[in-house]
Amino acid sequence: SAAINPGAAEVCNGVDDNCNGSIDEGVKTTYYRDADGDGYGTASTTTAACTAPAGYVSNSTDCNDANAAINPGATEISCDGIDQDCSGADLCACTAALLNGMESGSGITVTSTQWSLSSTPISPTQGSYALEWSSLSYDGSNGYWSTSASGQTASLSVTVPQGALYIAADLVMNNMYNGSTVDTTMKMTMTLDGSAQVFGGYPTSQVGQVKTVKWPITAGKWGTSIAFSANVYSNMSSYAAGAGLLVDNLRVVCN
């Protein structure tokens, strides 16, 4: 055969095309065991061949190769405790609900005296408390308000309910000044599960400025406790000004 010689390219055909003593080396395809016959294989059992042997397929996306009703193409049954479509979690309908607002019993741990649970939230319908940060500390000898520290952090943990698509919070900024000076460095960084949102850095006075921030939640986080923190930076030691921030209405949302 003129197609078989040391200069020929090896192809997957059961023949030693390049005369090197091996057959189909480096040209076989990996196939995956499909024990339940649903068309989806498992990565735990493989074979290399030119064409798929009986009981093997070209994909490895099955999360349960012992049940033909469970595979990436299956229809998920809501909240039955089974992950039919191999998404990583059982699908539950997302319904808007509070994570206890900012109630004192919702797992909040205040880590600084600069932070407190205020009884004057943005909306009383979304929890009885807001997490409040204030830098107001009056220096009578110099006649201005000041802060004792430039960075303060409050932290809490959030247990994510089934079906949550986002976690949201409302922020309110009060960045006041005496008519001539304002702390433009003042900002809040809020972090949920390692993802940060920044609020602030305004060049002018802001009173009652509201911003809603939210973080996407994956199904794999449902039922788990994730870390949440709010950090404020301010440099008001020489400003005749006051500043404060509220974190309110921590909640689950569906869009």
Image (tube, grey):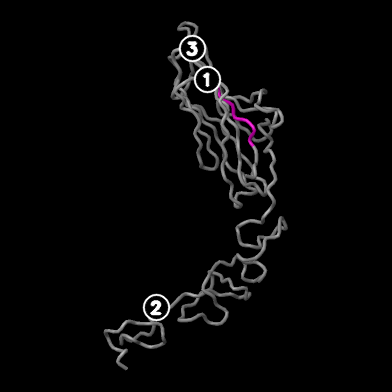
Secondary structure of the residue carrying numbered label 3: loop
- Left or right: residue 98 versus residue 229 is right
Q: Is residue 147 within the magenta segment?
A: no
Residues in magenta, as a range: 244-250
Q: Which residue is mark 2?
A: 27
Q: What residue is at 49 percent from the left and 28 percent from the top?
A: 200
Residue furthest toward the top? 141
For mark 3, what is the residue? Answer: 178
Q: Which residue is mark 1?
A: 243
Is residue 246 located in the magenta-colored stretch of the structure?
yes
- The secondary structure that dominates the magenta segment is strand
- Whether residue 114 appears in this view of the structure is no
* For the residues bearing labels 3 and 2, Cβ distance under 8 angstroms: no
- Give the SS element for disc 1: strand
Number of other residues with Cα within 10 Å of mark 1, as a class: few under 14, some 14 to 19, many 20 or more: many
* Disc marking residue 175: none
The mark nearer the N terminus, 3 or 1, is 3
Percent coordinates x, y for residue 236 in the rendering: 46, 18
Q: Nearer the viewer, mark 3 or mark 2?
A: 3
Residue extending furthest bottom? 1
Q: Are marks 3 and 1 in contact (CB under 8 Å)?
A: no
- N-terminal label among 3 and 2: 2
Task: Please name the amino acid that badge 2 sits on.
Answer: Val
Neighbour class for label 2 at 10 Å: few (<14), some, many (≥20)?
some
Query: Residue 185's quadrant in the figure?
Result: top left
How far apart in space, not on screen, are marks 2 and 1 (Cα)? 68 Å
> Which kind of residue does numbered mark 1 sit on?
Ala
* 58 vs 16: above or below: above
